[in-house]
Structure formats: structure tokens, C-alpha cells
Image: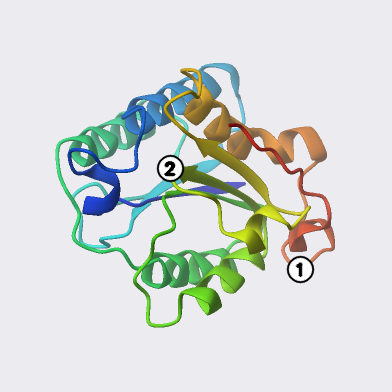
């Protein structure tokens, strides 16, 4: 299994007064990864970090959940927590993940952290592409209201983080992405389950 974590580091999220209401997404993502790495013996599993800014020093290609792999992921998250991205476009990281997913023989899951105030030329089309991602999808909506097309889709898990959200909700969303196929079984790309018929919706306010 490979899990891609896409992170929106644009000013609308990461700047002072931005839409990351708890400012804990990086630390809690690292916590979830470490927890799974400490309990899992599935060394074939991989986790990658894909910031909206693909040239970001926080980009980390899929890593095994080994000591070295977790260290690289943690360092990538630390770099992201100390910087500010430029891009508010979802299509470039989504295109990258779609391409990578097409090369995977095992299951693929995608966790997206964003306020979804994206500036793509056609935001609706990009959100529709995200909704039909060929694998498990968990959208973590930071501050803003979730896109209606995602919230209404029973095959998309949605967690909304607000100032009233309890600590740990970001970690739980990542943990869900890391463990979805452990709970539901690994499936080959192209199968019905991999195409999203087995997803669980989750919404935290």
C-alpha cells in the first residue's frame, strides 16, 4: 500500500490568520506516521509527502515505514512547518499522485490537507477529478466549508477542522488513510474497492 499526503501550504492556510485553525497538521501527521510505523510490520507499505509546491523542500517521495523512512518524512514535515508555500493550485499535486498511483500494483490512499480555496483555472473540474481518485480518499478541510461535491459523496471521507475541533483530529484523519486498507483488505488497482466503492465518510466539526 502507498499513502500520499498532499499538503496545501499556501498563504490562505499557512500565513498568520490563515485557515489552519489549530496549526497542528504537520505535528499530528508525523505522530500518526510514527504510531503506524511502531505497530506495523508491513515493510512493503510506503508514505509520501506531496506539497502543493512540488519543488518544496518538504516533498518526500514514498518512503517505507522504517526508521530511516520515518525520519525522512518527519524532516519533510518539519521543513513544511517552517515555511510558506506559493501555490494554491491542487491540480499539479493531484496530477503527480494520479501518475504515481498508475504505477502502483498495490492499494493507494490519498489524504489531502487544504482549505480548498484553490486557484486552479477550473476549480470545479479539479475537485471532480479529486473525487474520482482511484483509491481511498480522505479530504481534511482546514477552516473553510468543505466543497459540496466532496461532502455529498458517500465514497469520500471528509474531516473539517475548525477552532473548536479537538486536538488529534488531524492525526486521526492521517491514521485513517494509513489504515483504511488494513481494515478493509488490500485490493489491486482497478478493482471495485480500489475505485472507491468501499470508502467511509467521516465529518468532524
Looking at this view, is 127 or 68 the one in front? 127
Q: Which residue is mark 1?
A: 190
Q: Secondary structure at mark 1?
A: loop
Left/right placement of residue 50 relative to residue 195 reads left
* Disc with the residue nearer the chain's start (2 vs 1): 2
User: Is 58 rendered above or below residue 188?
Assistant: above
What residue appears at the point 45 percent right and 72 percent down from the top-left corner?
95
As drawn, the label of residue 37 is none
Q: Position of residue 182 (x, y in %)?
A: 73, 34
Q: Position of residue 11 (x, y in %)?
A: 21, 52
What residue appears at the point 16 percent right and 48 percent down from the top-left corner?
84
What residue appears at the point 67 percent right and 65 percent down from the top-left corner?
134
User: Is 20 rendered above or below residue 38?
Assistant: below
Q: Secondary structure at mark 2?
A: strand
Q: Position of residue 83 (x, y in %)?
A: 14, 43
Q: Residue furthest bottom?
A: 121
What residue appears at the point 42 percent right and 21 percent down from the top-left corner?
31
Q: Which residue is mark 2?
A: 142
What is the C-alpha distance between the residues marked 2 and 1? 30 Å
Q: Residues within 10 Å of mark 1 (few under 14, many from 20)?
A: some
Q: Position of residue 104 (x, y in %)?
A: 59, 62
Amino acid at each position: 500500500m502507498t499513502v500520499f499526503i498532499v499538503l496545501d501550504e499556501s498563504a490562505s492556510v499557512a500565513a498568520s490568520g490563515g485557515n489552519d485553525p489549530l496549526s497542528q497538521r504537520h505535528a499530528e501527521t508525523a505522530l500518526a506516521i510514527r504510531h503506524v510505523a511502531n505497530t506495523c510490520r508491513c515493510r512493503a507499505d510506503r508514505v509520501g509527502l506531496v506539497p502543493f509546491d512540488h519543488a518544496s523542500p518538504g516533498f518526500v517521495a514514498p518512503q517505507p515505514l522504517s526508521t530511516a523512512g520515518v525520519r525522512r518524512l518527519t524532516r519533510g514535515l518539519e521543513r513544511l512547518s517552517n515555511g510558506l508555500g506559493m501555490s494554491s493550485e491542487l491540480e499539479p499535486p493531484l496530477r503527480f499522485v494520479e501518475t504515481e498511483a498508475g504505477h502502483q500494483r498495490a492499494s493507494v490512499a490519498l489524504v489531502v490537507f487544504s482549505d480548498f480555496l484553490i486557484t486552479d483555472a477550473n476549480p470545479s473540474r479539479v475537485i471532480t477529478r479529486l473525487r474520482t481518485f482511484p483509491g481511498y480518499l480522505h479530504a481534511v478541510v482546514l477552516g473553510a466549508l468543505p466543497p459540496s461535491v466532496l461532502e455529498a459523496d458517500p465514497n469520500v471521507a471528509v474531516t473539517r477542522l475548525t477552532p473548536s475541533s479537538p486536538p488529534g483530529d488531524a492525526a486521526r484523519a492521517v491514521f485513517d488513510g494509513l489504515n483504511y486498507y488494513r481494515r478493509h483488505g488490500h485490493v489491486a488497482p482497478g478493482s471495485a474497492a480500489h475505485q472507491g466503492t468501499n470508502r467511509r465518510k467521516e465529518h468532524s466539526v
